[in-house]
Amino acid sequence: MSQDKPTIPTGVELLHDPLLNHGTAFTRKEREKLGLQGLLPYQVVPQEKQVERIMENFHRKPNDLEKYILLIGLQDRNENLFYRVVMENIDLMMPIIYTPTVGQACVEYAHIFRRPRGMFITAKDKGNIANILKNWPRDDVRAIVVTDGERILGLGDLGASGMGIPVGKLSLYTACAGIHPATTLPITLDVGTNNENFINDPFYIGIKEPRLRGEAYDEFIEEFITAVQERFPHALVQFEDFANINAFRLLEKYRNRICTFNDDVQGTASVTVAGVYSALRLTGGQLKDQTLLFLGAGEAGIGIADLIVSGMVEEGLTEEEARAKCWFVDSRGLVVKSRTDLAHHKLPYAHDFEPMADLLTAVEAIKPTALVGVSGQPRTFTQKIVERMAEYNEQPMIFALSNPTSKAECTAEEAYTWSDGRAIYASGSPFAPVEYKGKTYVPGQGNNSYIFPGVGLGVTAVAAKHVTDEMFMAAAKTLADQVSETDLAMGRIYPPLQDIRKVSLAIAVAVAEVAYKQELATVPRPNDLVAHVKTHMYDPKYESLA
Ligand code: NAD
């Protein structure tokens, strides 16, 4: 991929360029040639030693938010070093730069704000967005993550403070799949906030007005998308943490027009379906034999069900038969035909069945094989519910996916103990391994970052015109294939995070294959697709500037 070739700055300017700065690792030759003599202390410190120093500081920080601040500071100073640290310690770093800590960072964003990152496009910029995008210093942008901050994780409307999410997601594009950081762009659309706490907060960084709605909102998004297409024609645009009143509509509107996807809908679906495929290796049986009950009928739930339906159809069911195996309980009870309050996206899953007010009653009536929590409501998978699931199934699938950790429908420990060690458990945020009756269970984290970086890499490596559901299905199957027998023996239905680069490469290649099959790739098919994708993977080692 052609990167912008900036002329290398010198002196203090170079030290202040996070993409080029090597800090104390600049060699004597570089220091001499680039006007750095006298601007750095004497010792030349190799990158491995710099990593050790950062880790020493990391462990010294008293809490996760302080660790987050340390890492963001490093990212602002020296991106290569930041990515080396993150990649070498992915297990430790992922919960800091992404969920759960990033959630807390967004809540407190206005108070911990140090340096802007990415672009803030506001409702006041209407009519002028194309000009504003020109202020971004690099032309070759390949991956944009954009949010309007209305549904940040399970935390709700965080307005412009939601910026932590696009920043964090793009860091994962780079750390997990090697998309070059110079080609990424986080964007927050500040269209106001309805969060009263923020409006009353003297430090809040965004527009203190109610959110744009209706036609004005749609026009704003349309102007933004058109301007992005013009300014960054090769960019993949990932929609992130929009409220579901907008998310589904925008996805339908733009998915066949530009290269875009919605991670909350499609990425979540893919990682969850991968978890179900892996779990089936433990339980036996096929996808089409499963009955799934979802708590929460929003972006995540409906997205997952739609992909499950595609998988069941592949196994020979009709769409109608497949939908009949997916059930939903939302905040008003079981989603059934007789209800008159159902949003459009829930209608395909409204079955002809008696209304039921709560999850336990629904579990007892439907006897699902899998329970999927995507409600943002903590502690809703009660002991009784998990016990019922274990009564109906030898190995019930219990996926408590709500983020952050405080919102999980049940903890790993609860799932294992209440099911007498038989549950196949996955969560959205990480849980530590659990000892139960002498056995160690390793809960799987149904983390979208298993999927979207690889999908992004595959799509950008072949410059695909669109991102399709078939790509997400291919990603799910590839991810499930990466789970080893050893992982499964510990109850882990996802591969270890340390393998994420390998996993992302495999997913990228599978996605690129689909792009060629669907005639969506715009670069000629290379002889060796794996080698081609690998050339797009950034390595954070320092390149000599001398
Ligand atoms: P959403 O706002 O689109 O949907 C939430 C749904 O939950 C709505 O249908 C709502 O009616 C329902 N709900 C609210 N209160 C309820 C209650 N008391 N009982 C039953 N249902 C209730 O949000 P979303 O994007 O679907 O995300 C939902 C949750 O899933 C969030 O916590 C999010 O963090 C999590 N999530 C996890 C992953 C992952 O782990 N990979 C990915 C995406 C989303």
Image (spheres, helix red, strand yellow):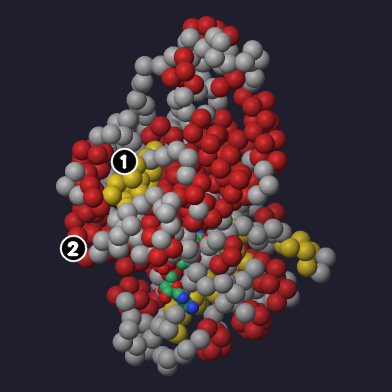
Judge left or right: residue 229 versus residue 305.
left
| Residue occupying image coordinates x 29% and y 56% | 191
Three-letter code, disc 1: Ala
Label 2 neighbourhood size at 10 Å, few (<14), some (14-19), many (20+)?
few
How many numbered discs sit on the rendered protein? Answer: 2
Q: What amino acid type is highlighted by mark number 2?
A: Glu
Query: Does residue 314 appear in the picture of this structure?
Result: no
Residue 66 appears in view: yes
Residue at 49%, 34% in the rendered image: 76
Image quarter (top left, top right, bottom left or bottom right) of the N terminus: top left
Q: Residue furthest bottom?
A: 354
| Residue 331 location (% of width, % of height) | 44, 80
- Counting from the top left corner in percent of width and height, residue 253 is at 23, 59
Q: Is residue 531 above or below residue 66?
A: above
On residue 215, which mark appears? 2
Callout 1 crowding tier (Cα within 10 Å): few <14, some 14–19, many ≥20: many
Q: Is residue 86 above or below residue 476?
A: above
Say which of 317 and 360 sits in front.
360
Measured from the top left, where is residue 120 in percent x and y?
33, 45
Horizontal side of residue 361 vs 318, given as left or right: right
Classify mark 2: helix, strand or loop: helix
Q: Can you name the residue that lies furthest to the right here?
A: 438
The residue closer to the viewer here, 491 or 30, is 30
In the rendered structure, find residue 235 and report the number of the disc placed on it: 1
Q: Spatial distance from mark 1 to mark 2, Cα to Cα?
A: 26 Å
Q: Say which residue appears at 41% left-offset and 80% top-offset.
A: 324
